Image (cartoon, rainbow, N blue to C red):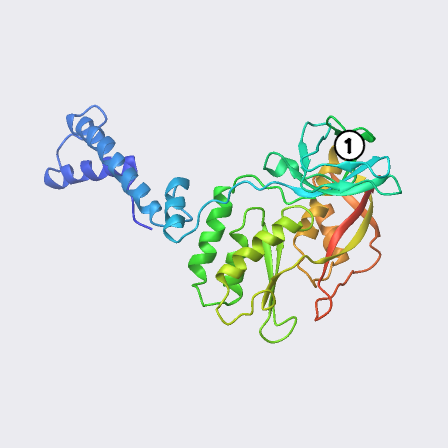
Amino acid sequence: MMDFQTFDQIRNRYLQAVLNQNPAAAVGPDSDHFVRATGIATVVEEFYSKLAWVFRQAYPDLADDDNMEKKANERGLTRKAAAAAAGTVRFTGTAGVSIPVGQQVATAQGIVFATTQAATVGVGGTVDVSASAVVAGAAGNQSANTPATVSAPPTGIASSATILAMTGGADVESFDSLLQRLLLDLGEEAQGGNDADYERWALSVPGVARAYIFPVRRGIGTVDVVPMPAIGLPSAPLLASVQAVLDEKRPVGMLPGYGVMALAPTPVYVNVAAVLALAGGYTLTTVQPQVEAAIAAEFSQLKPGATLARHQLVKAVLNVPGVTDVTLSAPAVNVTCSVNATALELIMPGAIAIST
């Protein structure tokens, strides 16, 4: 780091230079030399500040966001656009009645989704239809079995529906996220198809928050890429988008449609049940959201094939302010999953029950 002088240091250096020339010179706060030194220090400090700013712009992790973005653009990296959540909506109605493409449903919060395919209600009185958010963004992500209202339902279709799953929604990429991709690009130069290359390619797709690479899982000459959204499992549209990028970027020797594949993991759902002891002044109502967020964060750090260590969940909960003790009844033991030629499993949170 360059040695930039502070205001006081600059002024003191000026006054010391005066004394070096004339030890008897008046340099006190009411002296002419002190006034001149103060004025000069003010100007020079601005120069140093500008130099310090210029110095920081040379390094992506120190630069202002706009200049960091320009450095990313130079390497072909741009901020990812917002991505629309996609999933499935269950409609109820009379058997044989059709649901058209574009049929809209809305949550109580006003988030609107539209069907992306036509479907017909089955003999059981329900039909599950693919849908996506009308407006791209993370707000489109919904919990399983979220109630929704059908907009102008066709005759024979109930006015209420259920969003079975809706994931993959993402806001415009943050500057922090772009910086991390830039640092990855700088730290791992392109190698014509190594693990870092596949990770970079997958992360360039809007909606992909992280990606896991499994070379030769299906045999020599294969690479499996597991792109994960911020919440839930990758949707079919997200997998298709990632596959398109991989097909474009893959080494020429990789067989299309076989050599490199974007795949969704098989979820291994794990329920969590915890009884908390709280410090004075804390209530379950105020602590529970933080506890659930801490548990979710632990799950999000797991990659396919990783083990969920029970003690890590306990540690995460105990780190929440106000929690003095925790009894974890589920899971009772560490949970494992597999990645091999026939399995691609990922541990994910199931039902979470928090009590005191």
* Residue closest to the far right: 124
Q: Which x, y percent locates residue 246?
A: 53, 60
Tell me where residue 42 sits by quadrant.
Answer: top left
Q: How many marks?
A: 1
Query: In the image shown, does 311 or 187 lie closer to the viewer?
Result: 187
Tell me where residue 50 sits by quadrant.
Answer: top left
Q: Which residue is mark 1?
A: 285
Q: Residue at x 55, y 40 (%)?
A: 82
Helix, strand or loop at disc 1? helix
Query: In the image shown, does 171 or 326 lie closer to the viewer?
Result: 171
Q: Quadrant of the C terminus?
A: top right
Task: Specify few, some or many for label 1: CA neighbours under 10 Å numbering under 14, 14-19, or 20 or more.
Answer: few
* Residue closest to the far front: 96
Query: In the image shown, does 15 or 51 lie closer to the viewer?
Result: 51
* Residue closest to the far bottom: 220
Query: In the image shown, does 105 or 85 lie closer to the viewer?
Result: 105
* Residue closest to the far left: 21
Q: Is residue 94 left or right of residue 311?
A: right
Q: Which x, y percent locates residue 262?
A: 61, 59
**Vertical comparison of 104 with 245: above or below:** above
Q: Residue at x 12, y 34 (%)?
A: 24
**Is residue 283 among what the camera can see?**
no
Q: Which x, y percent locates residue 145?
A: 79, 39
Q: Which x, y percent locates residue 291?
A: 73, 42
Amino acid of disc 1 = Thr
**Is residue 115 among what the camera can see?**
yes
Q: Is residue 75 left or right of residue 347?
A: left
Tell me where residue 311 sits by quadrant.
Answer: bottom right
Q: Is residue 146 left or right of residue 203?
A: right
